[in-house]
Image: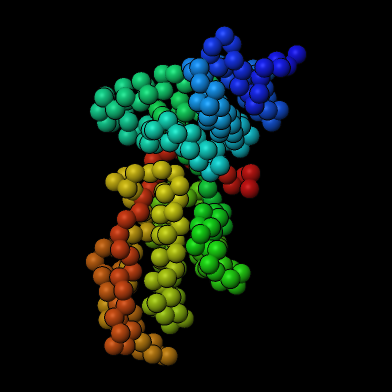
Amino acid sequence: MANVGCVDGVEVRGNVYYLRWRVPAEFKCVESRLEVNRSLKTRDPIVARSRAALAKDALRKDWQAQLFQKTKGPSVDAFQASISVLRDWGISYMPMIDLLSGSTEELVRRINGIEDADPKSAVIPAALGALDTPAVLISEMPQLMLDRQPKKMKAKSADQRRAWVNKYKNAAAIFVKLLGDKCIHEISEEDAATYAKHWTDRLQSGQITTGHVIKRFRFLRKMIDEYHELAGILPSKRMNPMIGFKVKGEPIYNSTNEGGQEIIAGRLGRKARWGNNPLRDAYPGGGGHCDHLCRDRQQTK
């Protein structure tokens, strides 16, 4: 029977307020309790209502993260939900390999920081760097990039948004055609070399321009960079396999491609010229590569 003294999940017992809240049906598969019953550690009704609201919000986020892990496996939704829970605890995400190679003090600080967490809480594997790496296929990355930039896309028309995402879709489609639909963090430098050779061969044959090649390199590099952002890879740990592939030389370009173009796979080429106009560097630097094992997604796509 419901307690008549329980309003919005807040119940007073003696002089102390408690949170008494029935677990929402959607989270029954990850929470065995029928209801949450805990002290709010206050005698002030206003403070009690505020703490109850914060506690319910935190529980919902934790249960949602657990639910994503259970139903979606190593997905972007599961990873980001767990990271969000971790941030609420005032802790930043760090992969386990970095924690183990770092200071003992940092590991102890994290363990102490989650000592009051429920044993099933999503914050525990997140704090200890034990989250599964999000298994994102290269074909999925363009739409994911679009979804992750709502403010930027809001200012664009439907046609502009379509054009923006299509340039990444085209780059991803070529990669899939050449190397298959790989998880982003599985892309190697050898894969990048194959992708780069496809475009440089077309450039040498006069089918496309230098600027076209620079853009195709940049689109793949940006997709990998964006993945590292959402996966929480520290900047110092990133090694984008596309970063070394650039256009070199100062060719005078015309419709017959006279004079040709010089392409290198490495860090030597810094600038290219089209006629008398210098182009920007193909890449400013940065990027990354994840060290975790991939969950093979190709068979379930």
Q: Give the total of numbered labels.
A: 0
Above or below, 171 relative to 33: below
Look at the image and tell me whether residue 154 can be seen.
Answer: yes
Q: Position of residue 24 (x, y in %)?
A: 68, 28
Look at the image and tell me whether residue 69 can be seen.
Answer: no
What residue appears at the point 33 percent right and 59 percent down from the top-left corner? 243
Q: Position of residue 214 (x, y in %)?
A: 39, 71
Q: Position of residue 298 (x, y in %)?
A: 59, 47
Which residue appears farthest toward the right when viewing the image?
1
Q: Position of residue 127 (x, y in %)?
A: 41, 29
What residue appears at the point 42 percent right and 49 percent down from the top-left corner? 229
Q: Nearer the viewer, residue 239 or 268?
A: 239
Q: Nearer the viewer, residue 129 or 108?
A: 108
What residue appears at the point 38 percent right and 33 percent down from the top-left corner? 91
The answer to which quarter of the image holds residue 109 is: top left
Above or below, 259 relative to 79: below
Q: Nearer the viewer, residue 150 or 216?
A: 150
